[in-house]
Image (spheres, rainbow, N blue to C red):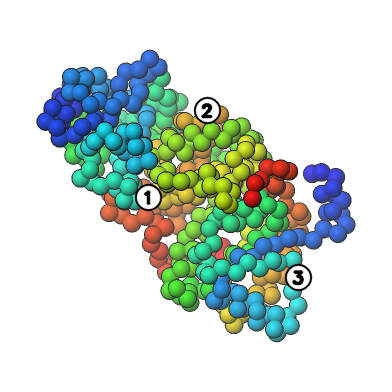
Amino acid sequence: MSNAVENETKSSWSPKIVAFVCNWCTYTGADLAGTSRLQMDPNVRVIKLPCSSRVNPLFVIKALERGADGVIVSGCHTGDCHYSTGNYHARRRFAVLHDLLHFMGVDADRVTFAWVSASEGNKWQQVVNETTARVKQLGPSHLFQHQEGGEGQ
Amino acid sequence: MSELNDLARKLLSECTVKVVIGYEEGSRGVRPAFITDPEQACKLVFDTRCVQNLAAYLNPRRKQITQLGKPAIVVKGCDARAVAGLIREQQITREGVVIIAMRCGGVLQRSETASELTSDTVSVRCAGCNDRDPKLFDHKLGELPPEPPVNPHRDEQIATLEKMTSAERWNFWTGELSRCIRCHACREACPMCFCVQCTADKTQPRWIDPSSTPPANRAWQTMRVLHQAGRCVDCLECERACPEHIPLGLLARHVANTMQRRFDYVASEDPSVAAPFGVFRPSDDEEFIR
């Protein structure tokens, strides 16, 4: 670990967490959490997608590689998908991604999968706070660490 | 092997096929052969050195071979799984290929030197093989040889890795993948890598950094393995092609284990079985989802 990162850990470091959420359930649920004035850790950056099945496993890897300390992937509960079956298909891909990340040594606590419906503002608050706490526990991610000058886009 | 040579000669001289894809004697062990002349059919051989999965040459991405015309292909059971996979994924049609299946008693790890099959020399993929007597074929040749010895090396290594802490696993993969030179031989050798444009070659946006850095190597292999999930037939051509001897077969086996445990899916020689990512069960396990 470089000195800069080490200093950051000791003083002001606060995790960066990227959330890939579906438009129909989790985004609306997160909106509800906001309008209900629920207190949440301000570490999560939300990226809205049409459906959880839009989440290419590569998004998660890319987020970690580009410096995210944690990732949340969230969509509708099974059976509630706006597109009927999108999240069933997504669930299969997430299962393989989850197991593969574990096998390659990525701490399971860095990547959170959750189903949050449009009415579950409280659950979103819980997912955000718990994930942030777990990632804080693990410290800064130097996992897929982006190399200087390595990337075009 | 005169049975094989006679069949190849017959198929070519009767113009049933334009090319027979098989194995021939090369300067360094057996090598893939593309026989278009019935006179050359005598060159074909088949023995325990025939490690290569020739189904890679049916891949429509390989225009230089597909342009030769209708092929016949010499396959082992494991290669037949790849042919079935290409049919399942609609890359080739069943009618478009003549499958010459060889009953198989296991193959060596490398094609260069002939030696006795022992638990050290036999390929790890032969352990527990159910396809020694192929089920997808037009012509099935040879007598069924006795079952080969079991090479437990890979399963032992996976068990060891599973027991490690995630930091230890991370270090193991960092060490292995740091040798990757990003030659993409694993992709080129793979019979199931059939995308017209690979995500790794895309530049707008650039998903995978093409330089050989640890994070880029890790992202590349993670992506490759995920794209092969449910397609991989465990032929281990990726590992054999790797000039840096990175144990890519471990990743392949791990994903295959996941597929079997979670979705009861095992790569088979039946092209009518649906690909596991094309279907789902409402009862699929979701213990990892909060």
Task: Between residue A80 and residue B253, name the one nearer to us.
Answer: A80
Residue lying farthest to the front in this orientation: B204
Q: CA distance from mark 1 to mark 2?
A: 29 Å
Q: What is the quadrant of the N terminus of chain B in the image?
A: top left
Task: Between residue B174 and residue B190, name the one nearer to us.
Answer: B190
In the rendered image, residue B282, in percent from the top left (x then y), is placed at: 42, 69
Indicate the quadrant where residue B33 lies.
top left
Residue visible at 70% across and 80% down in the picture: A34
User: Disc 1 designates what residue?
Assistant: B266
Residue lying farthest to the left in this orientation: B14
User: Disc 3 designates what residue?
Assistant: A41
User: Disc 2 designates what residue?
Assistant: B243
Task: For mark 1, give the secondary structure.
Answer: loop
Residue lying farthest to the bottom in this orientation: A36
Find out whether the residues at labels 3 and 2 contact each other: C-beta distance under 8 Å. Answer: no
Q: The disc labelled 1 sits on which kind of residue?
A: Val
Q: CA distance from mark 1 to mark 3?
A: 43 Å
Mark number displayed over residue B279 = none
Chain identifier of the residue bearing label 3 in the image: A
Task: For mark 3, give the secondary structure.
Answer: loop
Mark 1 or 2, which is nearer the eye?
A: 2
B196 horizontally vs B11: left or right? right
Chain identifier of the residue bearing label 1 in the image: B
In the rendered image, residue A106, in percent from the top left (x then y), is placed at: 64, 50
In the rendered image, residue B257, in percent from the top left (x then y), is placed at: 46, 49
Label 2 crowd (10 A; few <14 / some 14-19 / many >=20): some
Residue visible at 42% across and 58% down in the picture: B277
Residue visible at 28% across and 30% down in the picture: B21
Label 3 crowd (10 A; few <14 / some 14-19 / many >=20): some
Find out whether the residues at labels 1 and 2 contact each other: C-beta distance under 8 Å. Answer: no
Q: Are marks 3 and 2 on the same chain?
A: no
